């Protein structure tokens, strides 16, 4: 209950303070990428229950001759890359926090298709409400391997506290300002998770 109260108070305050930047970003997305402004995608929440996460759009909808979306690195525009670099695309997730679908701090909500690929240990990341930022994000962000990220997520689940959340929140601000670990080398975004390369059940 304390964590939920903390989420609501901080997310509400941030939405008020950042209301003007949010409007400006929305207008810029409309001008540079067209509609829709908001990207909605189904993600697994607490205990894997799906919800729709909100983000500002960062990619075009360009498709090949067969109607299939082009790879991320071809659809990600310089403007979209800038939004991701400073996490501006994720400002709308504060609304998810107010709705109770996200927490400020927790394992990042990933894709629904990853659920059957997790090991038993990796699946523990869904024992808590997912977050906008988390232990994995301040320990490498997207520049780490999937296995490293999941191990950070599980460590958070096993050691979570309000004090730890405050530490993560403060360190996240520094990471965003320095734009560290936005993507893996050679990738415009985080590569797809295809399953763990090693078994560490339990």
Image: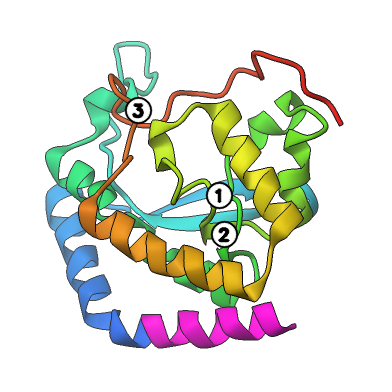
Q: Residue at 64% across / 86% down in the picture?
A: 5
Please provide the residue range marked out in magenta: 1-14
Chain-order first, disc 2 or disc 3: 2
Q: Earlier in the sequence, mark 3 or mark 1?
A: 1
Tell me: 91 left or right of 81.
right
Image quadrant of residue 186? Answer: top left
Going by the image, does 60 lie left or right of 157? Answer: left
Residue 49 appears in the rendering? no
Horizontal and vertical percent position of residue 97: 56, 71
In percent of width and height, residue 75 lies at 25, 30
Q: Residues within 10 Å of mark 2 (few under 14, many from 20)?
A: many
Magenta run includes residue 12? yes
Neighbours of disc 3 within 10 Å: few (<14), some (14-19), many (20+): some
Disc 2, disc 1: CB below 8 Å? yes
In the image, residue 74 above or below residue 1? above
Give the left or right position of residue 17, taking residue 55 as reference: left
């Amino acid at each position: 209950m304390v964590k939920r109260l903390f989420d609501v108070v901080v997310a509400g305050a941030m939405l008020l303070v950042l209301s003007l930047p949010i409007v400006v970003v929305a207008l810029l997305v409309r001008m540079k990428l067209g509609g829709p402004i908001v990207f909605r995608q189904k993600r697994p929440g607490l205990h894997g229950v799906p919800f729709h996460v909100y983000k500002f759009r960062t990619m075009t909808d360009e498709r090949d001759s067969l109607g299939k979306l082009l790879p991320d690195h071809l659809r990600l525009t310089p403007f979209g890359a800038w939004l991701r670099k400073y996490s501006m695309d994720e400002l709308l997730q504060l609304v998810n926090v107010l709705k109770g679908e996200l927490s400020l701090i927790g394992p990042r909500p990933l894709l629904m298709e990853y659920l059957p690929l997790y090991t038993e240990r990796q699946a523990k990341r869904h024992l808590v409400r997912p977050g906008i930022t988390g232990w994995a994000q301040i320990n490498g962000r997207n520049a780490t391997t999937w296995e490293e990220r999941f191990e950070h997520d599980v460590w958070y689940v096993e050691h979570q506290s309000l004090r730890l959340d405050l530490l993560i929140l403060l360190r996240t601000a520094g990471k965003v300002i320095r734009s560290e670990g936005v993507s893996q080398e050679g990738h415009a975004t985080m590569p797809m998770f295809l399953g763990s390369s090693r078994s560490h059940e339990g």
